[in-house]
Image (spheres, rainbow, N blue to C red):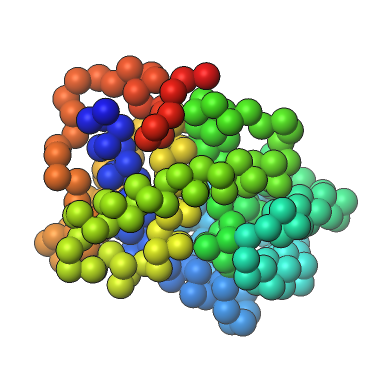
Amino acid sequence: MREQQYLDDLSVRAAVAAWTTGEGAFASDIGSDVALTVSLLDRWLSYWDLADRLRRPQRAQFLAFLEQTARPAFRAATEPSPEVFGLLDDINYQAVRDGLTTSSLMIMLSRFACSCRPAVYAPASQHSRRGMQIIGRKLADMSYRTYMLAFMKERERFADRVATIVLADDPTGAAAAAVPLDVLVMRALDRRLMLAGGFAPERLEALVARAAKPAGKSDAPRAKASRPSASPTRAGRNLLPDQTAG
């Protein structure tokens, strides 16, 4: 249980840290009517460690596709729904038909959608998909729609946990001021599922530490307990609160 609580807390702290050191700025630019540029796309790809997933000659084509097709559709989505999630699958298929060939197309489009509307879309990464299945939510297919319907069911459960962490560990309201709660829940759950799927906690700890360094202290809510020293069992690391294996 202690390991569970630590990983929940870490997910929230990392979500705040990431938002205040990059994600929030990208959401502001990409979710607005500011024109996409090659420079902005390059910075966005580098931020998400996706720069090597798209060959340099493909970037102009990808940029045009995002600006003309994907971005207007994603920005128009104001509320999560099965139709909104299915739209991303349609856009993915259209990108393939248009010749945008990369094995990371779905993760790139879902991350871009998240940058456009972070309260509506979440990235569908290998770690988060694996985490979703490990906690017991079987995915019938690889579509984004199927993944996000399962994600939103977990969101209903995890939202209470996030609110508890913020209230307990952030009495000044700094996190709430920095990140809207609906966005924080989405971004924290994404990271919690990644941890469940085998993503190294040390990488999120490093993110939180980097965010705290310039100001001397983190604006994120801090877990009251230090990270448990004992190695967690696989089930202990991979389950969300109130869930059992299988």
Q: Residue at x 46, y 20 (%)?
A: 245
Answer left or right for 187 relative to 129.
left
Q: In the rendered picture of this protein, how many numbered marks are placed on residues? A: 0
Q: Which quadrant of the figure has residue 18?
A: bottom left
Q: Position of residue 9 (x, y in %)?
A: 28, 45
Of 35 and 199, which appears nearest the observer?
199
Answer left or right for 141 relative to 177.
right
The vertical placement of 3 against 187, above or below, is: above
Answer left or right for 2 relative to 18.
left
Q: Residue at x 64, y 41 (%)?
A: 147
Q: Residue at x 31, y 37 (%)?
A: 7
Of 160 and 48, which appears nearest the observer?
160
Residue 82 visible in image? yes
Q: Residue at x 45, y 44 (%)?
A: 157
Q: Residue furthest left?
A: 216
Q: Position of residue 55 (x, y in %)?
A: 66, 50
The vertical placement of 200 against 69, above or below, is: above
Q: Which quadrant of the figure has residue 137?
A: top right
Q: Residue furthest right?
A: 97
Of 188 and 241, which appears nearest the observer?
241
Q: Position of residue 193 (x, y in %)?
A: 46, 38
The vertical placement of 245 against 20, above or below, is: above
Viewport quadrant of the N terminus: top left
Of 246 and 16, which appears nearest the observer?
246
Residue 204 visible in image? no
Q: Position of residue 128 (x, y in %)?
A: 52, 38
